[in-house]
Image (cartoon, grey):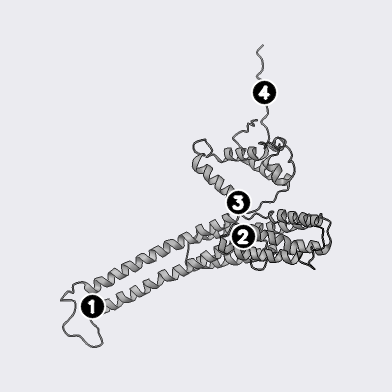
Amino acid sequence: MSLVVSQDGSQRAFERVRQQSQHSLEAHHSPDLFHGQHELVKAVSGPMATKERAAYKAVTEAREQLEHVQTGPQNAGDEPKTHRPSHPPKAAMRLEQAAHALAAASREPERLAQQRQQIKAHIRGLGHDYHCVDLERGGRRNGQRIASDIQGHTEHIRTIAQHEGLSQSCVERIEKAERVVPKMRATIELVSGYGRHQVAQLDVTPPVSFAMHAKLIPSYYLDRIAQTRTVHDSEPLRALAERLRISLFEPGGVLSALRPETQDHLHDEAKRLAAVFQRSSANVEGRNGYLSLRSHQLRGLDLPRKRECFTAMHNFFLPRPDGTTAAERFFGQKPRSRFAAILASVELVPAPLSPPRKA
């Protein structure tokens, strides 16, 4: 299948197709955590590292200047043989100034290192806060609280950038990262609403529904996060998840009176709903990076439009042996024809008029 579109207005046509496809599928754009953190790293961490290297260089120069004053030859004409007590010798003044300059330069790298550590902690704090479950207590978190915490980290980073006098481009990168925060909040609210809708369809009692939202689904979410951590860091998460589940199924628990088949079904649903929230697409970014390194320039894939067309074909047209496409597996239903959507969105060039026949 091939679709020829004129070069004039092709980019606008593709953008209309993308927007209408997103609208027709009612798909929410979930932001990637990597992009927000990456913008902040480029905005602040890089320039601060440059300033820290310059500060260490200034310390070296100040130390060399002090050694030169201490060991350098003294001109006999510099100092008079007799001087008044209120006027110290020039050599002593130069030595004192060099010592003060070295002390002031030595404090700057330590101050900048502390600032960089604070920036690093706030950038990591974005990843720690962007979870639909509290990793310390196991309770669910709402989108407003998450957005407030993330905004607090970006405000601290902005304050440090302004205090250090970073360039305007650095401030613009911080603003670009801040524009993702409303989408993060909307993603958490969408996931919460989807979970409530799915649990409501299970036809369970209100206590069981509350237990699913408050403990069972968060416990399996903690297990998912523990799989991405080291053995030492994953132990508290696994222990917290086990405590949340044990309290539900022990004698007298909310789910202990249910039949084993019902309990197994609730376990499966909780695992599925815990995997709905995806805050990062590291596998997609890794695939893009590998293709960019190995294949794009060799196969003509360095053109953005060509890559986007191939991605659309892979997601909507290439089926697995079971007959399903990637888009159908992702959305849980068969999407409407992409070819029909393109034809409805792109203004095809009319056929040229036939030249008049000669008599």
CB of mark 4 within 8 Å of CB of mark 1? no
As measured in the structure, the alpha-carbon distance from the residue carrying label 4 to the one carrying label 3 is 50 Å
The amino acid beneath tag 1 is Ala
Q: Residues within 10 Å of mark 4 (few under 14, many from 20)?
A: few
- Sequence order check: which comes first, mark 3 or mark 2? 2
User: What amino acid is at disc 2?
Assistant: Ala
- Tell me the residue that label 4 is attached to: 353
Q: Earlier in the sequence, mark 4 or mark 3?
A: 3
**Which tag is nearer the camera, tag 3 or tag 2?**
2
State the SS at label 4. loop
Residue under pointer 3: 281
Q: Circle 2 sits on which residue?
A: 226
Cα distance between the residues tagged 2 and 4: 67 Å
Q: Tell me whether circle 3 and circle 1 mark residues in contact (CB < 8 Å).
A: no
Query: Does the CB distance between marks 4 and 3 fall below 8 Å?
Result: no
Q: Nearer the viewer, residue 213 or 233?
A: 233
Residue for badge 1: 91
For mark 2, give the secondary structure: helix
Direction from residue 6 to residue 168 in the image, left or right: left
